[in-house]
Image: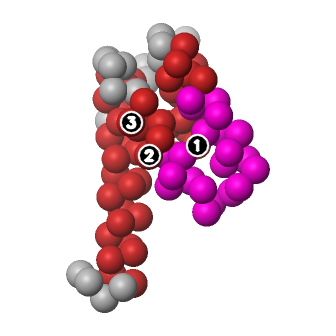
């Protein structure tokens, strides 16, 4: 018997985008997420923030516990990355 999904856990960026490709009912959003994964595969870490942002902005109509988890995880990743950049620039 499988475990219940833990929707309170923060996901990694690639894990979150992969969940979009598997769980979101919108073909447009799934296509954007698949393109994001391809871009990350090709460009690595330097493109991850941009791709996370693009997926986050395309999934606005997706609802439910998994959607909330993915949205929260990508938002926290982007906020964390912004906080690191601000502290590196001496702005924090």
Look at the numbered disc 1 and give the secondary structure of its residue: helix
Can the viewer see residue 7 in this picture?
Answer: no
Q: Residue at x 57, y 31 (%)?
A: 33
Q: CA distance from mark 3 to mark 1?
A: 16 Å
Residue 13 on the magenta segment = no
Can the viewer see residue 27 in this picture?
Answer: yes
In the image, residue 22 lies at what x, y percent? 57, 19
Look at the numbered disc 3 and give the secondary structure of its residue: helix
> Taken as a whole, is the magenta stretch helix, strand or loop?
helix
Closest to the observer, 86 or 12: 86
Q: Residue furthest bottom?
A: 90
Q: CA distance from mark 3 to mark 2?
A: 6 Å
Q: Could you say which disc has been placed on residue 14 in the image?
A: 1
Which residue, given by chain and number where applicable, does mark 3 sit on? 57
Q: Answer whether labels 1 and 2 touch (C-beta < 8 Å).
A: no
Q: Residue at x 40, y 27 (%)?
A: 59
Which residue, given by chain and number where applicable, does mark 2 sit on? 53
Near mark 3 (Cα within 10 A), the count class, few <14, some 14-19 or many ≥20, is few
Q: Residue furthest left?
A: 92
Quarter of the figure with the N terminus: top right
Q: CA distance from mark 1 to mark 2?
A: 12 Å
Highlighted magenta segment, given as a residue range: 32-52
Closest to the observer, 3 or 77: 77
Q: Could you say which disc has been placed on residue 46 in the image?
A: none
Q: Nearer the viewer, mark 3 or mark 1?
A: 3
Quarter of the figure with the C terminus: bottom left
Relative to 50, is 82 on the left or the right? left
In the image, residue 11 lies at what x, y percent? 46, 42
Q: Answer whether labels 3 and 2 touch (C-beta < 8 Å).
A: yes
Snapshot quadrant of residue 34: top right
Look at the numbered disc 2 and give the secondary structure of its residue: helix
């Amino acid at each position: 018997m499988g475990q219940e999904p833990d929707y309170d856990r923060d996901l990694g960026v690639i894990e979150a985008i992969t969940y979009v490709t598997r769980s979101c009912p919108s073909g447009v959003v799934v296509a954007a997420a698949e393109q994001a994964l391809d871009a990350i595969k090709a460009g690595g870490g330097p493109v991850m923030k941009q791709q996370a942002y693009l997926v986050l902005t395309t999934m606005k109509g997706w609802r439910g516990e998994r959607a909330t988890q993915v949205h929260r995880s990508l938002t926290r990743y982007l906020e964390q990355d912004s906080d690191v950049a601000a502290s590196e620039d001496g702005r924090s």
